[in-house]
Structures are given as C-alpha cells and as structure tokens.
Amino acid sequence: MNETPLKTATSKSDQALLDQFLTDNRLFLGPDPEIMRDHGIVSRSALEEELLAKPVDSHQLNHVRGLVNAALDESFTMVEQMGAAPGAKWGDLVTAIFTAKGDLSMIAPRGIVAFASCCHYPIKFILKYWVNDPTVGVKEGDGFIHNDCRYGGIHNTDQSMMMPIYWKGELLCWVSSTIHEGENGACEPGGMPAAAESVYDEGLKMPPFKVVENFQIKRDLLTFLQNSVRDPKLQLEDMKVKLHAVLRLRERILSLLEQFGRDALVTTLRKNLEDVEDEVRRRIRELPDGTTKVQTFMDSTLREPALQKLVMSVTIKGDRMICDFRGSSPQFTNRACNCNIASFKTALVTGFLQNVWPDLPHTMAVLSPIEILSDANSIIDASNDTPQAMSLMPLFKACTIPPVAMAKFSYSLPHRYTAIVAPQYDQAATFIYGGLTQHGDVTGNFCADINGCGQGARSHADGENALSPMFGFMCDTGEHEIAEEDTPIVRLGAQVLAKDRVGWGKYRGGLGYEQIATVKDSNIWGFMTGCEGSKFSSAQGLFGGYSCPAYTLAKVKGINVFDVMKKNPEQVRFNMLALMNEQPIDGGVYTTQDMGMTFEMCQEGEIYMICQGAGGGYGDVLERDPALVMKDLLEDLISHESARDILKVVYDETTLVVDIEATEVLRAAERRARIARGKPFDAFVAEWVTPEPPVHLPYFGSWGDLTKIHANNGSQRLVMDADKIQGVFMPNPKDLRIAELEAEVLAARAELSEYRKVGN
C-alpha cells in the first residue's frame, strides 16, 4: 500500500527562522532581476502619499526645483573642473538626485542622461540588500561606488559615487556623481576592451559597495582599486572628486532643507517624476494609433565583420506605447558587443529626451509609461555571463533609432515639441590608447573626439557639424594641446571637416571630421578603436534623405613621419585622402581596414587615421536649395562633382552663380530617370527578397519572421526559436588566419612536390 507522507504546517516562527537562514547564507548577491528589469518609478511612500494628498504650492515647487537644479549644476562644474579623467574634462559625466526609494528625479542640466538613469538600479540594490545587512548597513556619511553594468550602468569604464542624505535621522534622498573614467584594468588599456572574450577580461566589475564611511574614503578599499588598474593616480583623484561633488550636493540640499523643510523637498522630487510620467502619457494619447518600424545593423563585432540586426517597432494604441525589439541579433558568448536590457533602456531614455521630447525634464520617468519587449539572450537583452565591455555598439543605436520611428507619428501632429531630426552619427569614432607616456607614467584612456559626431539633418535646416556625441548634448571635444602635454599622442590633422563625407538630402546631415594621430617620445604605446560602420551606414536618412557614408580606418606603418618632416616637410599633406591616395612617403605600408581595431602597438611616427561620421540627411536631394549648395561649396564642405552629380545643380564653378532654369531642367530630367529606373514594389520584392540570408553572409538576427533568429558565424549556420536563443560563439580571427595560411602552405608544398616529380 502506497502512503503519501503527511505534510506538517510550518509555524510562523520556524518559517521566519528558515527565511533568515536562507538570507544569511545566500551564496552570491548577483544582479537582482526584479530590480534590473523594472524601468518604472516605484509606488509612493507613505510620506509621499500624505504630502501629495494635500494641495501643492506650485510656486514653492518651482523655487525648490530651481535650487536643486542650481546645486546639480554647481556640482557638475566641480567635477568638470577638477576631474582627472579625460571624460571629466570634456563633459562625459553627470551629477543627479534621487528620491529616498531610489528613483531618478533630476540631473545636472549639462549631464549625460544615461549615466544618471543607470544609477537608480544600484541605489535600489543597496536599499534592498545592504540597509538591513549587519555587515554593511547604510547611515549618514556613507558613500557607495559601482561600475558593473549588470547592476546598472552603461559599461565598466563609468564609475559612480552614491550617497544617502539624511535629515534629522530620516533618509530623504540620494545623490550621485558619475564619470567616464576610462582605464579600469581590463585586458586592453583604456577601459573599453574590444578583445574581451569573457566577463573576466573586462577589468573592475564593482557591484555597489561601501567605499566611504564618515565622509572619508576607506584607504584599504581605495588601495585595492588602485592595485587593480593601470593608472592608480587617476583612480585616486577621481574618487576624491566624485566624493566632494556629492558632498557639495549634500551641503546644498541640507541648506535647502533648513530653509524650506523636509516636506518641500520630498514633494518636489516626487512631483517631478509624476508630472513627467503624466505628461508622457498625455503625449502618447496625442499620437495617432498605429505601428511604425525601423531596423538597422551593426556590421562588426570589433573582431570580425558580422551583420547584427537591431529591430525597433513602435505601437501606439490610446495611451499605450510599446517599443518592441524582438527579432534582434542573438548575443555573443565571446564578444564584447552585448548589452543587458537595463543598460539598453537607459540609452532609449537618451534617444527620447534628446530627439523626441527634449523639453521634458531629464528623468527616468520618461520611460516609465512605455512598455519594452525584447528576446532574452539577444544582443540587447544579453545574459549576465556574456562580456559587455563594448555594449556601446547596440546602446548607441538605442539613442538614434527612436527618432526614426517617432518621426512618422510626430509628423502628423498639429504641433511638435522639437524639430523632426534624422539620426545623428552614432559611433564612438575615437582613438583609445594605452602605454607609457613621455613622462614615464603608465596610462590608458580615450580621446574626446567621440564627442564630435555630426548631427542629423532637421526638417527645417542642415544638421550642425561635429556637434556632440549622440548620448549627450553639452560635451566638448577637448583641447589637443592639453592631450599632447599629458600623452605622447601628436595630432597631425586636427578636426578638419571631412569634405563630401556627408548624409545628403534636402537638408544635409552635419559633417564629422578627420582624426590623424601618431606617437612621439614613447617606445611603448598603442591604439585601438571601438567603432563600426565600415560596411553598413551608421546614420540613416529620413524621408528620402541619404544615409551617411561608410568609413574605414587607414594606417601608414613602417615609417617615422617626424624624420620625413625634418628632411622634406612639403612632402606630406596631412589629409586622409591625400595620404592614402597619393602615398607620398616612400617605404610606408599603406593599409585600410574596418573601423574596429583591437589594441595594436604603434611605433614612433607611424600614422593612424579615422573619420568622425556625418548625420543622416532629410528629404529629397533634388529639393535642396541651390543657394545652400553654393554655401557648402564656398565653405569647402562638398566638391563640384557632388554638387553636379548628386544635387543636380547647374552653376558657374568660378563665380558660383546658379543657373536656376538649367537646374530645374536637370532636376526634372533626373526625376524622369528615376521613374524609368523604378519597379513596381511586388516586382522589386520578387527580385530582391530571398527566403533566408545568403550562405556567405555572417548574419545574425531575424529574417522576415521575428520568431526565428538566424546565426551564421562562418563555420556554423543555424536557426533558433526567438524564445530559446542560444549564445553564438565566434572563432578567434587569429585561428582562422592561421588555418588559412596553413592551407596555403600545404597547397604550396603539394605544388612543389608535383613540380619536383615533373622535374625528375
């Protein structure tokens, strides 16, 4: 006879004891999915509920908000003026204030939105796990540091300092300061290792932990962190800078509390969030119901060419807005270009705030009413065990594709909150460096050229040239003289706008500029880059505008340009096209390659060249005002060939006087030629669309059917269900090259053997 054992009820005291035992003996406090997958603002606290149930004094609210904003601006300036990292000097930073529960309420008016919108994740982790932990705890004078993107962040180069603010023993808010530090002890110098094949190659991976007690940095922990990176001076200086920034913020908030009291601050911080959330819901209701779609591709893993699809579908129905990214590329188990969904959402916030609703306060509440869908284990929703050091690749796309989808909704509105704008150039086109400086110091970091991307064309005007990074709006490209004092990098060509390399349209995208660099007075120095877009455009056009060009990296190795300049300075023109097309330096090895390059040693005087990119164009090129074409010619931004062949303008090349009638005739002829070249849509689809990706193409992502994900890494070709994505393992490019050369050797030996047989 089978008997079922009787279940005995567990008493409340026994259950509490069991729960406490499990809590005390938890193996590892990894990133909490409950925190990391929730981008909404939390429910009101009892105090917030009580305060907001009463009438709110809007004048006092505005006054307090202004004082907090001024304090954030002041602390931002402190970091910018005192920070040691290049990112601090050039605006890649932010200071912010959060509610007691950890929701981001306000950031500094010049700060990087994504840096702050990441920090609510680690603060919520601290509140959940450390407040009641007897070995940690949270009290006045404590400060926490963090950089691991899996606990909330962009990537491991960004370090945040977070501090709770108490008033009369009550926790009222949190403040933070974040800097793109750069060097973090990764397998390649500079903090953004494209060669990372696992999470253990990424350098420092700091979950939020206490590094400050009684307002002082703990020297033992500081020493540990300094011992883990190539630049211990940088680690020390900027930890102190971030700490003093949050201390200044604390000082200003305490002064505000003395003047206005607790209730005014708590009400302001919460109301700022709820007002933004309510306004976003109202704006969603304004939009027409429907769905728009946009897709783009990353064309490199930074180790090899790979076409990685990123899909965005936006659906509006009443006050519901759904952003659907299902069908995007699968994650890579041994490439650094993955990102987690929390990081991706913070980049989405940036895309909406900078290009769709820039008039709204910069807070995470912008995304709170929006539903996000993604495939687990995709490149934008990667698992925590994948490397994510170069998560910038998909994250930058999240900054630039929302305006494409939203433009189609906003176009029909009777009023708009900003001009409709085509995507900005969205790559980190800059040199990352590392080695021994001319002063004998070991360092690694990145150049500020990342902050000079061309703006997308607008619905009423050209995009601004080399305006800003796509992730921020108030950053600087730095002073080359300062960089040359600190490092052995010498700029042979500095910020010359890249003629003709532009996104054409009725209004053109803003141009980027050339970067030509070498090294002097150091025999241990190297460069790498962290960008793609050499095969597939990184900035789409809008409403008929052209995308920006694809860009390559060029090198002249095996020479010392300083010796050439001493002997024959007129021999060299520091222009990327002239150097590569004319090849004026004898003995140089002239090569081009994809923009992505892992760390490579550079000998003194060897030349490395990349180009910051242009934004996408807006509208039909045949509608461009000929006067604007002449202006571009006058400023040497475009060539006569482009004016004639692309923009179809007839004019005198000497006087730049336009023949209006002849231009209209030429453009009318081109429109007729377009019609003649055109095909019915069904005929085009029948000729162009294939059932699956071509066999030779390293392709990753959906192909028509979003529920099926294709992956072809060169040696394997498979199709996965979107809800069961496996990570893709990429072979080492060096192994592939070795196998290729070995095959050539075997073939040569066989040929030689046959030759000897014939000879005998």
Image (spheres, rainbow, N blue to C red):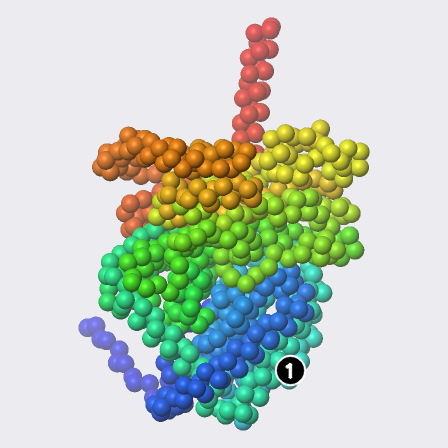
How many numbered discs, if any? 1
In percent of width and height, residue 561 lies at 73, 38
Q: Residue at x 68, y 65 (%)?
A: 84
Q: Residue furthest top?
A: 760
Q: Residue at x 37, y 47 (%)?
A: 619
Residue 302 visible here = no
Considering only vertical position in the picture, is 166 above or below 602? below
In percent of width and height, residue 518 lies at 69, 44
Helix, strand or loop at label 1? It is loop
User: Observer-nearest residue: 167 or 419?
Assistant: 419
Image quarter of the N terminus:
bottom left
Image quarter of the C terminus:
top right
Considering only vertical position in the picture, is 52 above or below 532? below
Residue 519 visible here = yes
The disc labelled 1 sits on which kind of residue? Phe
Considering only vertical position in the picture, is 136 above or below 452? below
Left/right placement of residue 452 relative to residue 82 reads left
Q: Residue at x 39, y 53 (%)?
A: 459
Considering only vertical position in the picture, is 370 above or below 382? below
User: Observer-nearest residue: 17 or 171?
Assistant: 171
Mark 1 neighbour density, 10 Å: few (under 14) some (14–19) many (20 or more): some
In percent of width and height, residue 171 lies at 50, 87
Q: Quadrant of residue 320?
A: bottom left
User: Observer-nearest residue: 540 or 188?
Assistant: 540
In percent of width and height, residue 700 lies at 39, 45
Q: Residue furthest left?
A: 1
Q: Residue at x 47, y 45 (%)?
A: 628
The residue that disc 1 covers is 215
